[in-house]
Image: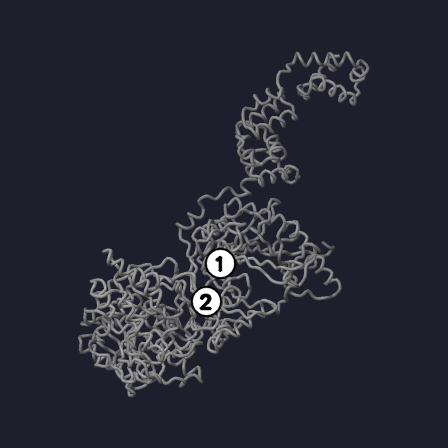
Amino acid sequence: MSERGAPGGATSVRGIAAAVRSREATASSVVEETLERISAMDGELHCFHTVMAKEALASARALDATIAAGRDPGPLAGVPVALKDNICTKGTTTSCSSKILENWVPPYDATVVERLRDAGAVVVGKTNLDEFAMGSSTENSAFGPTRNPWDASRVPGGSSGGSAAAVAAGLVPLAYGSDTGGSIRQPASFCGIVGLKPTYGGVSRYGLVAFASSLDQIGPFACTVEDATLGLLAVAGHDPRDSTSIDREVEPLLDSLGGGVGGLRVGLIEEFAADVAPSCSGAARAAADALAAAGAKVGEVSIPEVRHGLPAYYVIAPAEASSNLARYDGVRYGLRVDAGDARTMNLRTRGAGFGAEVRRRIMIGTYALSAGYYDAYYGQAQRVRTLVVRAFERAYEDFDVLLAPMTPSEAFELGAKTANPLDMYVSDLCAVPSNLAGHPAMSVPFALGESGLPVGVQVLAPALREAAMLRAAAALEAAAPPGVRGPVKLAAAPAGAASDGGGE
Amino acid sequence: MPDGYETVVGLEVHCELSTRTKLFCGCENSFGAAPNSQVCPVCLGLPGSLPVLNRRAVELAIRIGQALGCEIRPSVFHRKNYFYPDMPKDYQISQYDLPVNVNGHLDLPDGSVVGIERAHIEEDTGKSTHIGATGRIKGASHSLVDYNRAGVPLVEIVSAPDIRSAAQARSYVSELRRVLVAAGASDGRMEEGSLRVDANVSVRPDGSTTFGTRCEVKNLNSFRSLVRSIEYESKRQVALLEAGEAILQETRHFDESSGETHSLRSKEEAYDYRYFPEPDLVPLEPDEALLRAAAVGAGLMPGERRRLLWEAIGASLEEHASGALADQIETVIDLELDRLVVDAVAAGADGRLALARAANEAAANPESARSLGAGSFAALLQLESSGSLSATQSKAVLTVLTEEGGDPSEIAARLGFEGLGDAEIEELIDGVVAAHPEEWSRYLEGDGKVAGFLLGRIMRESKGRANGKVVSTKLAERRSRA
């Protein structure tokens, strides 16, 4: 990847941190340059809800002072990062793209935000998402959609579309999203970048506004596997404030990247091929071939249960969401539409504050948990979830990592699926099994589709086996044809200028 | 209870655990702080916050289970979903089909046994104050919510429907309260809401083996309300049955001012709580270490304390049933003076005297009495038993002893209760006999009524320093010699 634009010439996470740590560049100059880029380009893309110029510059100056004083500024010194706007930032609005939290300013930082600051990263802004992370295109934002930097008429995917597009457009080298049913990986695939969902419990959820608690996981977006790994390492590890956080030392994952795939047992999941576009299934098969060529033992594996993941997901996630979103009742914070009594105030507030998709999922989830229906819906979905977990366990007896298509299609046009929610839900088909199982999975850019848009390949691994997953991902990255990944070269202003991707 | 019917009661007692911090966050768990001063993102249910289970609360909950003879099992937290302004997340984290404690029992002082179906852990809600004429939500101009109580750890103890009267319900709650206090799990202060009771009440014809339709009565914040509401509710239900009407299963509110219950919501209007496993918490699996840690620090349970007292006073089985001693025993247990009595008996005091003085006199100042040394209490009681001090004198010495401490004999001397030897008493008797020859003759002739008069005169002459018992004995001796 060419290193362009930033002072010192670096645009990668590793490059910027190295430049800032060695005083080739100052954190202030990196952040100033980043803010200029955002201000020039984000008008059309709408990646950001909030650009934290003042806070970012102050953090950068403080970092520069730390460095000047000879103290360690941290491994991500001066790296500008963007955060999906469902990650709490003390003193800065965290809207979840919802009218109900439009003006909500958290009084505390999410654990990942604390860790990023400790690592020397500089939070430059909060990015667009589907409201409360419910969606696959970022069109369900109360504040307007984000556009795909490769083609502004296309969606960037979702729900973490703002973060994905910001990285793909080169606005920031690193961004974070949350993945409940593919919300990191699917937009990463649509935007031609790396998106990584860690093992459930690998990164603290404290401060991530909950959508579906048993599925949500925070993870990084970056242009390269190495940068995504650096982004993961900065935030991973046990957090006593999250009871589901895994109490285990984080592996030194960077060592895995150069490890190669010699002897790695790689299984290509057969099931999705029939359900996805040829460009997507073709990319997965090409990836399998590439890994075989690089020395991996590659085979095919049938895991029929994964095809039941989607319906199970669309019961479990709304069920948990119906409970998680109950607190937006107008009593304590966020929007309130006043009424004569508390009950009416609740109803009016929620009716006015939530968008159509959020209301739909609250209703689905409420229904699925209702007396008399619980066993048929929620109970059944949990049983399917167990089946998916067991099916993966069986597959991992024979394989170290699995490959699958990431998405059923390339990035689609804005408005293409907004009329039919089920069409939109199918976007998550290949992604949700990993969420149900709590396993790590990531999208690596690997091909260009018919329309010239990037297509990602999904690498899956068992819980806590990020090292094996990253070995495969690094090998795929090395084998990928040119022009499949961001950052996209963008012209600074006019609309539609972002159609010829290719960052190499 | 109207003739021909039996009341059936099951009680749900919510007990606030006396932990230092709340159930899922580090906020202080204490009563009476300024509104909304003990809150944080977690107990306010702010977006993104997550609960972390308080280990101490789990230990105390298990200790309650141990005290009630429950099976202690692996358990799971559930979310109980319903909208209420004082509930920050609009769901309560509770335990549902897999509670930590199940299948226990509570033995009441009268020998009856009430089954405990479960005792589970859950979080408390905040507290609403309705501003307006009545203080009720109806007609209020606005409401204020204090979230200091939100997230305070509770154990909900659910009895089997084994209770058959308001009196037994009262006895159950007071015995449960003693158990919770003895376990160190609760301060037992009903007036501060540390214990809150809901009663499931039904009635059935005598001899019936099936249960009638029950109503759940809420808002029972005192023993008085508990008893009154159950009595009211049974009468109401019997009246309905007698009139040939059906009882509707519903939730009812007890109005302390009218002494009546009113319907809050019917079965059809009951909330659908949509319970499901709380995904933000992991299952609770008590291991041996946790069970042992839970047991450390629990005090003696009231049943055991009662047994030790009966043993100390050496009462017969008939006396157990008679009530008089039992009342004294309950008093000293409630005031935590039972240890004093048992230890004083071990130090040589008479059991019944020790019990009586503890239940009546020491009870006037229980705070100080609890720090009274069993040795000096026993020494005082021995002075009384041997006749060196009269009962009146002994009580006076006890008052000083309780307030100031010291040696009972020295206190008695200081109060002038000592020094009237046999000779001095004989001298006083001589004087009174000489002054009242007529009365003395009648006494000698066996007129019992005049004995009191003579005793009173002698005591007055002694300015209270003579021991009445000793004087009586001496008077009787003179008569038998005459």
Question: Dividing the picture into quarters, in which one does residue A119 lie?
Answer: bottom left
Q: Which is nearer the eye, A390 or B44?
A: B44
In this view of the protein, can residue B262 be seen by the observer?
A: yes
Which of the chains bears the disc numbered 2? A
Residue at x 37% of width, y 85% of height:
A413
x and y, in percent, of residue A267 in the image: 26, 76
Vertical order, B125 against A433 (above or below): above
Which is more toward the observer, B85 or A364?
B85
| Amino acid type, mark 1 | Pro
In the rendering, which numbered label is found on residue B45? none
Residue linked to disc 1 = B99
Q: Nearer the viewer, residue B174 or A152?
A: A152
Q: Is residue A182 visible?
A: no
- Judged from the image, the secondary structure of the residue bearing numbered disc 1 is loop
Between disc 2 and disc 1, the foreground one is 2
Query: Disc 2 on helix, strand or loop?
Result: loop
Q: Do dots 2 and 1 share one subunit?
A: no
| Residue identified by numbered label 2 | A104
Amino acid at the residue labelled 2: Trp
Q: Quadrant of the N terminus of chain B?
A: bottom right
x and y percentages locating residue B415 in the rendered image? 62, 21
Position of residue A325 relative to residue B299, above or below, is below
